[in-house]
Structure formats: structure tokens, C-alpha cells
Amino acid sequence: MRALLHERLAWACAVAGLATEAEKALSHAEEALADVGAAPQPDWVAWVDSNELQIMSGRCWSELRRPLRAVPVLEAALAGYDDSHARDKALYLSWLAASYLTAGEIEQAAKVTGRALDLANGVASVRPKQRLAPFVERLARHRDVAAVADVLEKAAV
């Protein structure tokens, strides 16, 4: 439970632009996760594991516009994230796409956005597509890039 609270604090700090505080909270979340065997935990925190913490770390670094920190963490965490969790994976891929856009890696941002759009199709939630819409708009400035043209076509469907 402490790990969940610390990771939520990290997210709040990241949204507020407080990089040092976000990093401290992520570190505390990692420590709390390592201590998880010490006491019984409520069922509602069972999903908080090292992979979830990696995803939150990547999201925080993405939000703080630190792509060199965000990209490797998100790629590692999402590599083992099953596509059967399409809604969540599409959302998490949006932070990876944002990091690539921040880094100026247009083709890679388009590739990840396209993958997220594929996953978002058919899920019973509008949130992934809403989250991806601004990235599609930002990518539209680069419509002459083949990968971007493909994403724009996919997003229009």
C-alpha cells in the first residue's frame, strides 16, 4: 500500500513539474515495494508490482519532459505487458509516444502512436483515443513523413 501511495505522490509531483520530489517519491515507492512481504496487503493494491512501478516511473519522466529517462523505462516495462490489457497498454504507450515526440524522434513517435491506436480500437473506453488525439495533432505537422501519414490515416478511421 505504501508503494502505491508513493507512486501516486510521484505522479502528482511530476504533473506539478517537481522533478526532484518525483524522483524521491519513486525511490520511496521502490523501497516500499521491496518491503511488501513484511505485512499483509489489501487486495486492492495487488496490481502494484515492479512492472507497474516501472510504468509509473516512465510516465513521470515523460510528464517531466525527460525522454532520455522515460523511453528506456517505458520500453522495458511495456515489452512484457500483454496486449490483452489493450486499454491500459494503449494509455501507457501514449506516454512513450510523448517522450519520443519530446526527443524529436518523429518516426518512432508515429510508430508507437500507431500501435497504441491499434490497441485502442475496440476497447470499451474512450480514454486511450482521447489521450492519443493531441499526439496525432502534433504529428500532423510532419505529414510528409511516411510513418506519420500512416498514423494520420489510421486515426481518421
Image: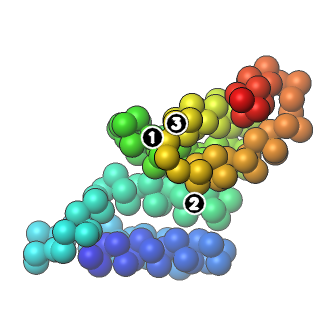
Q: Residue 4: which quarter of the image?
A: bottom left
Locate residue 61, reporting x and y percent. Answer: 57, 60
- As measured in the structure, the alpha-carbon distance from the residue carrying label 2 to the one carrying label 3 is 29 Å
- As measured in the structure, the alpha-carbon distance from the residue carrying label 1 to the one carrying label 2 is 22 Å
What's the mark number on residue 61? 2
Asked whether, in this view, residue 76 is left or right of residue 21, the answer is left
Name which residue type carries label 2.
Trp
Between 150 and 30, the one lying in front of the other is 150
Q: Nearer the viewer, mark 1 or mark 2?
A: 1
What's the mark number on residue 86? 1
Name which residue type carries label 3.
Gly
What's the mark number on residue 135? none
Between 49 and 87, the one lying in front of the other is 87
* Quadrant for the C terminus in the image: top right
Mark 2 or mark 1, which is nearer the start of the sequence? 2
Q: Residues within 10 Å of mark 2 (few under 14, many from 20)?
A: many
Taking the image as drawn, is residue 71 in sight?
Answer: no
Locate residue 89, reporting x and y percent. Answer: 47, 44
Residue at 37% over, 37% down? 84
Mark 1 or mark 3, which is nearer the start of the sequence? 1
Mark 3 or mark 2, which is nearer the start of the sequence? 2
Task: Decide: is 36 above or below 50.
Answer: below
Q: Residue 139: which quarter of the image?
A: top right
What's the mark number on residue 122? 3
Q: Are marks 3 and 1 in contact (CB under 8 Å)?
A: yes
